[in-house]
Image (cartoon, rainbow, N blue to C red):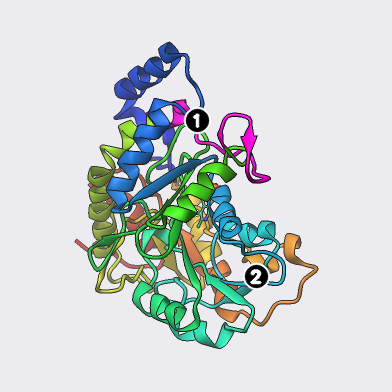
Amino acid sequence: MKIDFLNLKLANARYEDEIRSAVGRVIDSGRYVLGEETLAFEREFAAYCGVEHCIGVANGLDALHLILRAYGIGPGDEVIVPSNTFIATWLAVSQAGARIVPVEPDPKTCNLDPQRVEAAITPRTRAIMPVHLYGQPADMDPINAIARKHGLRVIEDAAQAHGARYRGRRAGSLGDAAGFSFYPGKNLGALGDGGAVTTNDPELAATLRKLRNYGSEVKYRHDLAGVNSRLDEMQSAVLRVKLRYLDEDNARRAALAGAYAEALAKAPLQLPVALPHVGPVWHLFVIQTPHRDALQAHLTERGIGTLVHYPIASHHQRAYANETWPDLPIATRLQSEVLSLPFATYLQAEHVHTVAQAVMDYFGGVSGP
Ligand SMILES: *Cc1c(COP(=O)(O)O)cnc(C)c1O
């Protein structure tokens, strides 16, 4: 049995009829940018996340970058980010012109370790940008407490965590503002690029509505030197369809993660670890093993697709080679030990069994129940 890491056509097949009619509705409307669909999606996604405001933008990177800009964070300022994340978290800070201050994760959850944050704060620190990596919320209570104590903003990178919960509250409502991505492979994925900011801060929301649209809210009147970063009507219409299925999809992911965990319980590897008070949405199912490369080759040979999130930590990327970074041994180890198993809402118990069996075979054992 060949099992892809993720087949997006298959993943979207469940909603195909509804998506086609939503797209048809947009074509017929004659309005393709900043119209009714985007307004409706913003309203619906804000309600879903449990916040007052949602501002659609062109992608997740812009969402994060524009939040920083709207808060006036730029040259001379520092922003604390996790050492292991998708590079967009770092790029958002670079684009704002601020300095990246990487902090190491808890090696089990792979999320920003709150105990390491305070030591990284300087008089120039303006914000902490925790990432809800792999769909698990970062430990937000201690992070928010540190931020309050030092007068810092907390900006969630929620690009992998649509619907995730922390003490009952949803990602997107856990800091001052959050950036989401609707890249096709995310838990809530468009059929192209898309992103959004969620916040309860009315001033920030008003600034972002201008920033994303040439600094303008009234046509041809420009209050800010903004950018063009809008979520379009087509993608908004698609996202409105898929938002209605998000909780159901996330429940499937949770069931799948449970099945993987059970089948791999006896494997000599590190399974994903979730904090007791979080509800992860399992964007990815990431195992850790020092035998990562050999295990990946073994799975590839058997037709099982895997990916590595991420094979080169941001501080090792050529893009950041001209800057000096502290030693980041956890991020450095994770880049060579993490492996993401096939994970998609259409996978069935038999797929999990096949993958788990192949993993167990590599380690010379039998898979669990
Ligand atoms: C996908 C992603 C982003 C960027 O989103 P884009 O829409 O691709 O720009 C940012 N941060 C994390 C953690 C992501 O996974």
Give whichever of discs 2 and 1 has the lower sequence position.
2
Give the numbered dot on residue 232: 1
x, y (%) of residue 291?
A: 51, 69
Q: Nearer the viewer, residue 321 or 147?
A: 147
Vertical arrangement, residue 253 with respect to residue 221, above or below: below
In contact (CB < 8 Å): disc 2 and disc 1: no
Q: Is residue 285 visible?
A: yes
Relative placement, left or right, of 361 versus 196 is left
Quadrant (top left, top right, bottom left, bottom right) of the N terminus = top left
Q: Secondary structure at mark 1?
A: loop
Q: Is residue 108 above or below residue 182?
A: below
Which amino acid type is marked by label 2?
Ile
Residue 309's disc number: none
Q: Position of residue 113 (x, y in %)?
A: 45, 79
Residue 100, numbered circle: 2
**The magenta segment:** 217-237
Which x, y percent locates residue 244? 26, 37
Q: Looking at numbered disc 1 in the image, what kind of residue is underneath it? A: Asp
Compared to residue 121, the image places residue 196 above or below, namely above
